[in-house]
Image: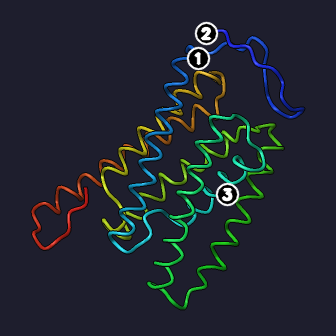
Amino acid sequence: MANHTYKRKSPGRMCFLNMQHLFSQRVELLLLLGMAFFWTITYILVIYKSYQDRTSGMPTAAICANITWEFLFSFILPFDPLQQIITVIWFFLDCIILLQCLYYSKKQNPSFPTKTVIFSLMAIALLLHYGIAKEFHDLEGKYSAFGINLMMSILFIRMLMIKNFQGQSTSIAYFKMIGTLCISVLCYSQYPHSLLLTMLYILIFIVDVVYIVLITHKSENLIYKPNKIIAK
C-alpha cells in the first residue's frame, strides 16, 4: 500500500495528509495515461463513425453532460495540470461530436427544435455539475463523471436498440470499457472506502459488458447479410 502526501490547494477540496493509496504513484500514472489514451481513441472513433454513417454517434444527453463536465473542469475548476491537458483535449473532441449531433439531427428531423433542446440540456448539466462539486466538496468531479459514464453506457444500449448499428461499432464499445476500467481502478486506489464510487465502477462495468455482448451479437449477424454494412 502506497503512502501519498497531499497538500490542501483550496478550502473546499478534499485533500488528506498521509492518505493511503492501494497502488504506487507510478501505477496510478500508468492508469491515468491508459484512461486518457483509450477514451481519446473512443472519441476519435465516435467522430469517424458519425461521419461515416451520417448520424450522431453519441446519445444527445451524454454529449450534453460530457462536454459541460469537460468545460467546467478544464476552464473553471481545473484540479490537476496533467488531467487538465487531457480534459481540454476531450473538450475539443466533444465539440466536434456536438457539431455532428446538431448537424445530423437537424437533417434527420428538421421540425424538431434541436438547438433549443441541446443547449437547454447543456445549461442544466453545467449547473448540476457545479452544484455537485460544491455541495459534496468534490472539486475533482469524480461523482458526476462516473454518473455520466453510467448514463452513457445505458444510453449506448438504448441507441443500439433504436439505430441498430448506425454510429456505433464494437471498437468504440471495447475502447470505452477499457478506458473506464483504467480510471475505475485508479479511483478505487485513491478512494477504496467509497461505497458509492465502488457501486458505480461495478455497474458501469456490467453495463459495458452487456453492451459489448449485444453489439458483438449484432455484428456477427450482419456478417451473414451481404446487403448490410458491417461496422467494426
Provide the residue designation for mark 1: 25
Left or right of residue 129, residue 37 in this image: left
Residue type marked 1: Gln
Residue occupying the point 51% across, 19% down: 27
In-front residue for pair 146/158: 146
Near-viewer residue (81 or 229): 81
- Residue at 41% from the left image edge and 38% from the top image edge: 178
Measured Cα–Cα span from mark 1 to mark 2: 8 Å
Which quarter of the rendering shows the C terminus?
A: bottom left
**Applied colour scheme:** rainbow
x and y percentages locating residue 231 in the rendered image? 25, 60
Q: Residue at x 30, y 52 (%)?
A: 170
- Residue 54 percent location from the top left of the image: 37, 75
Mark drawn on residue 122: none
Instruction: Please name the amino acid that badge 2 sits on.
Output: Ala
Circle 1 sits in a helix, a strand or a loop, which is it? helix
Location of the N terminus by quadrant is: top right
Q: Which SS class for mark 2? A: strand
Q: Position of residue 190 (x, y in %)?
A: 63, 23
Q: Give the amino acid at mark 3.
A: Thr
Q: Which residue is mark 3?
A: 68
Whether tag 1 and tag 2 are in contact, CB under 8 A, the answer is yes
Mark earlier in primary sequence (1, 3): 1
Image coords of residue 167 (percent x, y): 37, 65
- The residue at the point 64 percent across, 29 percent down is 195
Left or right, 33 with respect to 217, comes to right
Nearer-N-terminus badge (3/2): 2
Mark 2, residue position: 2
Q: Is residue 133 above or below residue 185?
A: below
Estimate the spatial distance between the alpha carbons at disc 3 and disc 2, rounded to whole Å: 33 Å
The answer to whether residue 206 is above or below residue 31 is below
Q: Earlier in the sequence, mark 1 or mark 2?
A: 2
